[in-house]
Amino acid sequence: MSFKPRGVCSREIQLEIDEHQIIRSCRFAGGCHGNAQGIARLVEGRPAQEVIDTLSGIKCGFKQTSCPDQLAKALTQMLEEQRESAAV
């Protein structure tokens, strides 16, 4: 999945989660390269919902969001899409 974050320096978040909702890969395009790499490595292998619960609501300076918060939004969207696909 490719997610276009809003209100942050990153231009794109690429994610892959498996059928058990474990994050298999996470890549940021743009933004603070070192921080984005660190976030990606920390979340890979973790349950998506755990990452959502941990990162939701984090702000960057005076912004109302952050790259970690946008990652949580991307994961939330992915889980909703998975639920909708399973229901069909």
Image: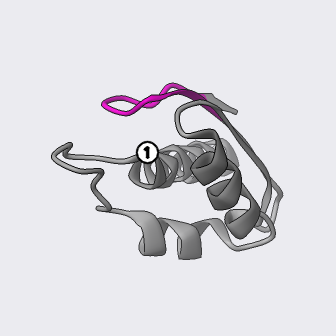
Q: Mark 1 points at which residue?
A: 70
Residue 21 seen from this side: no
**Judging from the image, what secondary structure is the residue with disc 1 in?**
helix
Q: Up-down: is 51 above or below 27?
A: below
Between 60 and 44, the one nearer to me in the picture? 60
Between 10 and 54, the one nearer to me in the picture? 10
Q: In this view, does 45 lie to the left or right of 49?
A: right
Q: Magenta segment, which residues?
A: 3-13
Between 29 and 61, the one nearer to me in the picture? 61
Q: Which residue is drawn at 37% across and 33% down?
A: 8
- Return the x and y of residue 21 as percentages of the image width and height: 72, 64
For the C terminus, the image quarter is top right
Q: Which residue is drawn at 65% across and 48% down?
A: 34
Q: Which residue is drawn at 67% across and 59% down?
A: 38
Q: Is residue 44 left or right of residue 29?
A: right
Magenta segment includes 36 = no
Magenta segment includes 11 = yes
Q: In which quarter of the image is residue 44?
A: bottom right
Q: Which residue is drawn at 44% across and 66% down?
A: 55
Amino acid at dot 1:
Gln
- Return the x and y of residue 71 as percentages of the image width and height: 51, 49
Q: In which quarter of the image is residue 43?
A: bottom right
Between 35 and 49, the one nearer to me in the picture? 35
Q: Up-down: is 18 above or below 36?
A: below
Task: Check disc 1: other Cα within 10 Å, few if <14, some if 14-19, many if 20+.
Answer: many
Q: In this view, does 47 lie to the left or right of 62?
A: right
